[in-house]
């Protein structure tokens, strides 16, 4: 009688467990303990339904009480299904890839460098701590780059420079040298 595999019939306001037991009805929606969490509808089964069930240990740990199943109202459930389906599309994954990069950085700051708590009092000192920690993280990241003996490749020529080269117009190494 697990809550994840139970089916609901909203017209009769009943929930059926996988073993075929039907709840006495449901109540709610009730507000949850968190002010930002969605309200839940609660379906209750009786002790007489749950006590003889062979799947009871998988469903509930209490020896005395019966199973309560909580689920969101239909509007919220439909929204969850729609959003979870949308999250499987390549477009959503491409948009989220941008966010996941910064999420990783924030996670590194919060967990790896103790940025959940500030060591100093006052906004200017806290800001200084954040800036110095960011500098330290950048140095740490740069030090992890592979060492190369070769010079970095030069920038590709601009369209104007390519035009000059194609028309055999000489150009000095530095445009600043023209006036001298």
Image (spheres, rainbow, N blue to C red):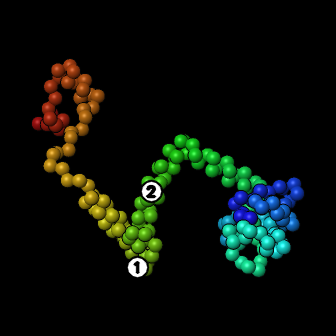
The image quadrant of residue 73 is bottom right
The one of 43 and 22 positioned closer to us in this rendering: 22
Read off the residue under disc 1.
120
Q: Where is residue 70 in the image (x, y as percent from the top left)?
A: 74, 65
Q: How crowded is mark 1: few (under 14 residues within 10 Å), some or many (20 or more)?
A: few
Q: Is residue 133 left or right of residue 65?
A: left
Say which residue appears at 35% left-offset and 68% top-offset: 133
The one of 162 and 87 positioned closer to us in this rendering: 87
Residue 150 visible? The answer is yes
Residue 83 to residue 31: above or below: above
Read off the residue under disc 2.
102
Q: Where is residue 71 in the image (x, y as percent from the top left)?
A: 74, 62
- Residue depth check, mark 1 versus mark 2: number of the one nearer the observer: 2
Q: Is residue 34 left or right of residue 67?
A: left
The image quadrant of residue 159 is top left
The one of 7 and 84 positioned closer to us in this rendering: 7
Say which residue appears at 76% left-offset and 80% top-offset: 64
Could you tell me which quadrant the C terminus lies in?
top left
Residue 68 visible? The answer is no
Q: In this view, does 95 lie to the left or right of 39?
A: left
Number of marks = 2
Residue 84 to residue 19: above or below: above
Say which residue appears at 15% left-offset and 49% top-offset: 149
Secondary structure found at label 1: loop
Sequence-wise, the earlier of marks 1 and 2 is 2
Say which residue appears at 27% left-offset and 58% top-offset: 144
Q: Position of residue 42 (x, y in %)?
A: 78, 67
Could you tell me which quadrant the N terminus lies in?
bottom right
Label 1, label 2: how far apart the Cα atoms are? 25 Å
The one of 117 and 66 positioned closer to us in this rendering: 66
Q: In this view, does 105 lie to the left or right of 54?
A: left
């Amino acid at each position: 009688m697990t809550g994840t595999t139970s089916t609901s019939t909203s017209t009769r306001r009943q929930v059926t467990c996988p073993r075929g037991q039907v709840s006495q009805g449901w109540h709610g929606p009730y507000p949850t303990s968190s002010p930002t969490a969605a309200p839940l509808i609660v379906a209750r089964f009786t002790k007489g339904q749950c006590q003889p069930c062979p799947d009871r240990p998988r469903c509930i740990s209490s020896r005395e009480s019966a199973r309560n199943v909580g689920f969101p109202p239909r509007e919220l459930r439909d929204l969850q299904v729609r959003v979870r389906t949308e999250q499987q599309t390549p477009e959503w994954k491409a948009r989220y890839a941008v966010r996941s990069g910064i999420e990783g950085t924030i996670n590194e700051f919060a967990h790896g460098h103790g940025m959940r708590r500030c060591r100093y009092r006052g906004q200017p000192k806290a800001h200084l701590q954040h800036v110095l920690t960011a500098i330290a993280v950048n140095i740490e990241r740069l030090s992890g780059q592979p060492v190369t003996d070769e010079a970095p490749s030069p920038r590709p020529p601009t369209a104007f420079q390519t035009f000059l080269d194609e028309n055999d117009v000489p150009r000095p190494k530095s445009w600043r040298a023209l006036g001298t």
